[in-house]
Image: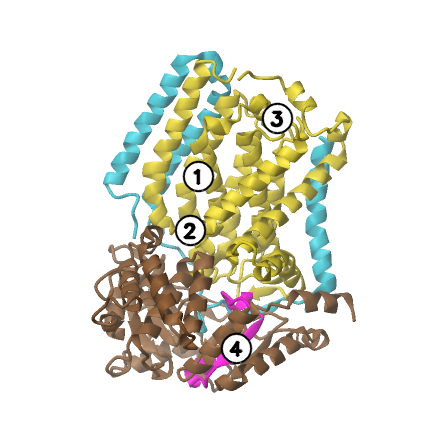
Chain colours: A yellow, B brown, C cyan
Amino acid sequence: MTRTSGTRAATTGAGMADPTTWTSVWAGLGVVAGALVLGLVLAWFDAVARAGVRVGSRAVLVPAAAAPVREGMRLLLGQRRTTVAPDRLLRTLAVCAVPVLALTSAAVLPLGGHSVVSTSADLVWFNAAEALLWVAVWMLGWAPNAVHSLVGAYRFLAQGLAYELPLMFAIITVGVGAGSLRATDVVAAQAGGAWFVWTMPVALLVFLLGAAAFTFWGPFGAPAARDIAEGVLSELAGLDRLLVELGRAVFLGVASATAAAWFLGAEDGPVLPGAWWYAIKTLAVMAFLVGVGRRLPLVRPERFADIAWMVLLPLTILQTAVVAVLVLGGFYG
Amino acid sequence: MGLSARVARFSLARPHVLVVVGSDGRAAGSVVESALLGRGWPLARSPADADLLVVAGSPGAELAAAVELLWAQVPAPRSRVHVATSSDVEASLDAAARHLRAWEAQRSDDGPDDPWAGQGPGTGGHQHAGNDGSESGDGHGGHSHDGMDVAGLPMASSAPDRDGLDLEALRVKLGPWLPGWPNGLVVEASMQGDVLSDVAVHWVDDAHPGTVGPQENALDALVRLLTLTGPAPTLRRWRETRAAVRQQRPGAVAQAARSAHRLARSRVLAWSLGGGPALAGGNAADVLHRWCDVLSGGSPAGGRDLVVDPQELATALQGADLAGARLAVASVVVGPGRTPAHGEGEDGDAHVGHAGGHHGGGHG
Amino acid sequence: MIALAGLVLGIGLVLTGLQAAATALTVARTPAMSLPFESGNLPAQHAVSRFHVRWYALCVLFLAFDMEMIFMYPWAVVVAQTGATSVVEMFGFLGVLLVGVVYAWREGALRWV
């Protein structure tokens, strides 16, 4: 298990031959398009899992696969909606912020040894995009001046207090292992099968749990649960709702691809081209996330706080400590 | 046919349906439920999420007003249908779906524009509309007004909370319609944060929807609870099981018993349901367990111990948080009560006055 | 930098594209005026008010940790160079914070219902 340089990882990468591509406008546009595709694929997985498909039952599978497109079109056609004395500014900001943050988080996805925005703190970039959702979702719940929506907004904050620290420790563990906060360095450090998942399984699981929680998806859907008539979403219709739902799906899709890059070595793998490996790993992460998440009942924030602070937090700190000791021992090269 | 009409035909093929069931609408409601399951039309989670409003049975005056208000909150394209008896369900749903996708007609509908629609002068609380002067004072349960009316609504006033802090108390009503809620139940309460206090419970139009057998009670309660907690595939299977038992399909009862046995063993679900207020001798997780016993034939009481009085429910919800309260309400069967639970003396009038007084002044 | 401009452009295109598509296709361009949903009842008061946040103790605990995380990002980069001392110092500090968490847990700060 030796560490290879970033340049080598780039050449074994997805075959993005021309480096000038990465400094052009097309790279940014391409990443936005890619993030939208990730969101759509995730929504497909989700719709199939929600329908509770038994293997081979095409009667459910086919309509479920069409569901994300149909629901998206339905919202595009639908009328928007406004309540009495809402905070229009906050609503507009929030409704745009959710998809914008989701697409922004894709900027640090490492692709073939590059990413659109490669900073010395890519991991912090993702962390910041996700943390800003606190503001966005709270504004979303506050703006319509409706009681269920307001309860949902504060549920999201309570949930945030529980998932955020374990998630941050999971992200930092990746940085410690790679000795760098740059996403491309993280991928380079995993070349040759030295995937971080072997030494950081807890961090991977907590990262996925955090992704489900910050998109208030599946078992962490309390801020938009049925008991408060969809909470933060309860007063949204038409384009407004579409933007928020799009943002949630894209964010979860990008987080799946990010997990594939940070913990599963992105393009690293034998025989097949790197891009194939990256796609296969991303799909596997999505299938795992959706397959487990859609089998679990709702986790109320007040039930989750205990577990997050007393179990997940010590576990992730232990995970970071183990990785730090391994770094000292020269394990990661 | 224009582009948007084509897109509409595709995208509204599976409309989201908001079903309101009147006190005499149980039979029609269950036929609607199985029709929706068969068509794969999802249930709406809020009016904003709905395309189709289905009213089953004949609602009384109070529920009818609620239906009008819900309808006024559904954005276009939208369609509504009234299903009086169980025989005309399929035809009514087809007609509603056709209307929903009739794009030119939908374009001219324009959706709701008057937020106070259906609550005009003469109906219910809006009688007080011109009556601004009487705002402060009577019928407000001692809360004083600070005279801050914005868009016809006052701000919440403050009151001491359960821990003795002086905090803003918001008057809210839960029901008659919410997802995973007993049809027609209304819980009125003050909410500080999401903690309920000052709780009163009554049936809409003072009409209890009637009693049914233990099996149906158990299935209703399980579906309500799973509506609130999921997971989605489990909820779907239980809705199908309930429909099968209602239609007396062969083997349905035995199938329900087996599923109940499995559901009762789910420790994750029990954990998810736990922690709420105690009602009928246990929290929602315990009550779920006992309903499962009813279905698998292991309960001598047959679930009679899980039927609670409205007054008992109101007491149990005091000081509960909203999520816990919703689980508690979903878990039990609420009985008719001795008399209308809120109708003691002038209290009943105070409720009406309350709602009317607060939004008095209306939209002007 | 140009790639970043492309990203911003792409995000702008998504938002304006959806807005344009919605305007062209939507059934009604004016939003529906609605009362806030309250289970089929008229709202009695404005919902936006000071919300009783019963997990305020948790917020304080969170802040203590969150500040610590800010130091941890740069620490992650240099841990290999600075060696065992920095690891001992960091996890010693985290240990102190965890003692605080255990104390808060015992005092019931993690439960608010």
Indicate which disc, 3 or 1, sits on the residue closer to the N terminus.
1
Is any atom of residue B138 visible in this view? Answer: no
Task: Identify the image quadrant of residue A311.
Answer: top left
Q: Alpha-carbon distance for marks 3 and 1?
A: 24 Å
Identify the subunit bearing mark 1: A
Amino acid at the residue labelled 1 = Glu
The tag earlier along the polypeptide, 2 or 1, is: 1
* Mark 3 Cα-neighbour bin, 10 Å: few <14, some 14–19, many ≥20: many
Residue B74 visible? The answer is yes
Q: Residues within 10 Å of mark 4 (few under 14, many from 20)?
A: many
Q: Answer whether residue A91 is magenta in the image.
A: no
User: Is disc 1 on the same chain as disc 3?
Assistant: yes
Kind of residue sitting beneath label 2: Leu
**Residue A296: numbered disc:** 2
Q: Where C57 falls versus C82 (above or below)?
A: below
Chain to which mark 3 belongs: A
Nearest to the eye among marks 3 and 2: give it: 2
Task: Say which residue label 1 marks.
Answer: A164
**Magenta-tinted stretch:** B41-65
For mark 3, what is the residue? A184
